[in-house]
Image (cartoon, helix red, strand yellow):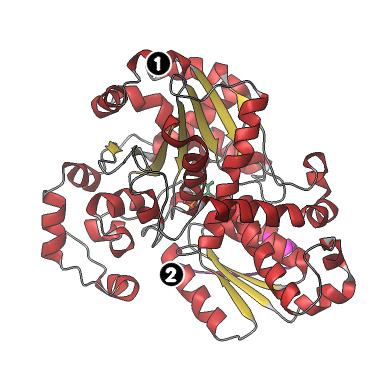
Amino acid sequence: MIILNKSASLKTGGLELRDKAIITLVNESEALKKVKNREEILWINKDKNEKNDFKVEGLTPEDIDDAEDRLSRFSEYIMKAFPETKKDKGLIESPLREIPLMKNTLNKNYRSKLEGKLFLKMDSHLPIAGSVKARGGIYEILKHTEDLALEKGLIKKDDSYEKLRDPEVRDFFSQYSIHVGSTGNLGLSIGIISAEIGYKVTVHMSADAKEWKKDLLRNYGVEVVEYTEDYGKAVEEGRKKSLEDPNSYFVDDENSKTLFLGYSVAAKRLKKQIKEQNIMVDKDHPLFVYIPCGVGGAPGGISYGLKVVFKENVHCFFVEPTESPCMLIGMESGLNNKISVQDIGLTGITDADGLAVGRPSGFVGNVMKNLLSGIFTIKDFKLYDYLRDLMNSENIFLEPSACATFEGPANLLNYNNGIEYIKSINLNSKMENATHIVWATGGRLVPEDVRKEYLKTHIKNK
Ligand SMILES: *Cc1c(COP(=O)(O)O)cnc(C)c1O
């Protein structure tokens, strides 16, 4: 039985999808048939085009430089406001760490046939917000703040932005408000930075959001509005509330190019770390990167940056839960944000709260069309297995959403189309030189009692 959320499709897309059209769509695609059946799959992107120049309409590599420069201008401010960033001189950055014991575990427990080296990019441990959202979310608020402050003559571009911490400047920002819809982590990141700058900030939380994330925000003086519906609803309501107030700014996770560019800076920083650790990336030393995907902004922005930096030598994969693979269905159908997981009968409900998104970003699918290698889907029970595996092998804790990333290296070579992909780009004999990076997207702020719960959670394999 197809459940079609007609009104939602109409509102966001203006394209009326009829039940029949969706049935045809699903029946004509082997991938969508499996996705509808909640099977785990590896979807390989047929539109990936290695010969292009990695340019995408509406985005340029200079946009990434511009975002990087803006973050530098704020480094003094960030260092003063968040002393935990001192060691990186006010840059919000995370370690890149080799995890050889986890590699052994994957090869042993999952017959992964993984060669080369396995690294963890620890955005789980980013300062301020403890998740990948500390990149895009904070960047967007800083950009908005700079725009306002320049316009009102509070600062000049070559000033030290420390000025923004003066009481009268904070007073100025208290006339302005920020709204954002979130499944949890984006709210944390936007809430914390906005409260620090002085804004009135309201976070609209979907039903998936964890209690401890809401509590933490309230402690920062952030207003938290709770919804019994999913992320799409929280965003819709947040947008509405923001429109009612002329002094309000809405962080639009579903469409924001600013968020996307904030994430993309990660690639330039990673390039430095790769060099420092003497990791080779070239035609004989391929780089594979796996990133959990919700609405698509974070994995899309990071991957766009990586393609600009490493070009055809980097292979980017997303990972999504079997119950909410919104980017996969958007890209496979070509409908992008004009289709939702509910349209094909999935619930969108998953233990991976950060990935519980039913409809993908309106523009990320398009940006990734020629750049993305593929998307893995993962069942919820495995999130906790990987969580324990990483704890037991490397003594590192990640939240369940972040653990989705391990599905990539664990199973790339257990799928026939994964093996074919490697062959098709002539990498068979080069896999022993490969570097695999799993992108850990969150976990540092998870309270001790919740960690303990996760470590003993077992879900039936259904
Ligand atoms: C938000 C989030 C993601 C995915 O980011 P999107 O921009 O929603 O695709 C992945 N992991 C965690 C832990 C997150 O919070």
> Does residue 382 lie above or below 221 as drawn?
above
Q: Residue 380: image x %, image y %?
A: 40, 40
| Residue 460 visible, this orientation | yes
Q: Which residue is the site of mark 2? A: 233
> Does residue 221 lie above or below 27 as drawn?
below
Contact between labelled residues 2 and 1, with CB atoms less than 8 Å apart: no
Q: Residue at x 38, y 49 (%)?
A: 368
Q: Residue 9: image x %, image y %?
A: 28, 70
Q: Residue at x 10, y 56 (%)?
A: 24
The amino acid sitting under disc 1 is Lys
Q: Which residues are magenta?
A: 217-229
Quick check: 362 left or right of 213? left
Q: Residue at x 38, y 19 (%)?
A: 112
Quick check: 78 left or right of 339? right
Of residues 221 and 284, the one nearer the viewer is 284
Q: Residue 186: image x %, image y %?
A: 58, 57
User: Circle 1 — which element?
Assistant: helix
User: Circle 2 — which element?
Assistant: helix
| Residue 188 visible, this orientation | no
Q: Which residue is the site of mark 1? A: 430
Asked whether residue 230 is drawn in magenta, I would say no
The amino acid sitting under disc 2 is Lys
- Name the mark on residue 296: none
Of callouts 1 and 2, the N-terminal one: 2
Which quarter shows the N terminus?
Answer: bottom left
- Of tags 1 and 2, the one toward the viewer is 1
Which class describes the residues within 10 Å of circle 2: few (<14), some (14-19), or many (20+)?
some
Q: Residue at x 56, y 56 (%)?
A: 63
Quick check: 459 left or right of 135? left
> Does residue 315 lie above or below 81 as drawn?
above
Q: Residue 40: image x %, image y %?
A: 29, 37
